[in-house]
Amino acid sequence: MAIFQKLFAGPIAVNELARMLPVTRPAVSQHLKVLKDVGLVTDTKTGTRRLYQLDPEGVARLRAHFDQMWTRALGAFQQAAEKDSGGGRHGKTSRRTRSKSV
């Protein structure tokens, strides 16, 4: 997540990312590879450096996925809430009467 957030500011090289984070350069490279493999990051070679940046299309697909997931989850929650409120008690809790000791 930290790498993703750093890339939000714009293209950046692996060495620069590694300097900003408490992990090694190889670890940053591995994370970037995963982000690239899933389509969230692109890279371009500039001289001897490789710059990484967020892929707007990949981020849009990720957002669409989360939007769809939340829409389904909230729809299911609404259906469950409506089903529960359709019962006879309408959210009232039963009260127990205390028996008096003689």
Image (cartoon, rainbow, N blue to C red):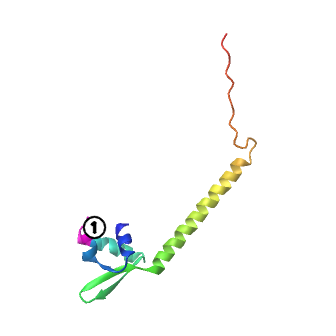
Quadrant location of the C terminus in the rendered image: top right
* 8 up-or-down from 72: above or below: below
Label 1: element kind: loop
- Left/right of residue 28 with respect to residue 79 in the rendered view: left
Identity of the residue drawn at 52% across and 67% down: 66
Q: Residue furthest front?
A: 9
Q: Quadrant of residue 36?
A: bottom left
Residue 74 is inside the magenta segment: no
Measuring from the top left, give residue 44's x and y in whole percent. 33, 86
**What residue is drawn where x is 69% and y is 42%?**
91
89 above or below 3?
above
State yes or no: residue 25 in magenta.
yes
Q: Residue at x 23, y 87 (%)?
A: 48
Label 1 crowd bin: few (<14), some (14–19), many (20+), radius 10 Å: few
Query: Over which residues does the magenta segment extend?
Result: 18-26
Under mark 1, the amino acid is: Leu
Residue at label 1?
A: 21
Residue 86 in percent (x, y) is at 74, 48
The residue under the point 56% across, 65% down is 69
Q: Is residue 77 left or right of residue 40?
A: right
- Where is the N terminus found, in terms of image quarters? bottom left
